[in-house]
Amino acid sequence: MCLAIPACIMSVEGTKANVDFGQGVVRDVNITLVEAKVGDYVLVHAGYAIQVIEEKEALETISLWNDILEAGQK
């Protein structure tokens, strides 16, 4: 099973994008598999953006992840 996490593209330089996963987690990912620009949300798996997704869908997924993480800390 694969796990992809949504992130927002903050900047693009060539085939790399700096993305924000939220809560201070920022990483560089490869964007050669998608056509994405600054402000787009992408699903990231193993350092690669594999799909561009709608902002609403990304924010809903991020909210669910946050709920799961909070429940695990109780």
Image: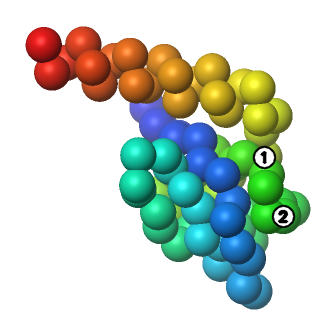
| Figure check: 17 above or below 19 | below
Mark 1, other Cα within 10 Å: few <14 / some 14–19 / many ≥20: many
| Figure check: 13 above or below 40 | below
Residue located 70% across and 73% down the image: 11
Mark 2, other Cα within 10 Å: few <14 / some 14–19 / many ≥20: some
Instruction: Inspect the image, locate mark 2, and give the three-letter code of the amino acid beneath it.
Output: Lys
Instruction: Inspect the image, locate mark 1, and give the three-letter code of the amino acid beneath it.
Output: Val
Confirm whether residue 23 shows in the render.
yes
Q: Where is residue 9 in the image (x, y as percent from the top left)?
A: 69, 60
Residue matched to label 2: 37
**Mark toward the start of the polypeptide (2 vs 1):** 2
Confirm whether residue 48 shows in the render.
no
On residue 52, which mark appears?
1
Left or right, 55 with reference to 4: right
Q: In which quarter of the image is the N terminus?
A: top left
Q: Nearer the viewer, mark 2 or mark 1?
A: 2
Q: In which quarter of the image is the C terminus?
A: top left
Q: Where is residue 71 in the image (x, y as percent from the top left)?
A: 24, 13
Q: Under tag 1, what secondary structure? A: strand
Q: Where is residue 27 in the image (x, y as percent from the top left)?
A: 47, 67
Q: Residue furthest bottom?
A: 14
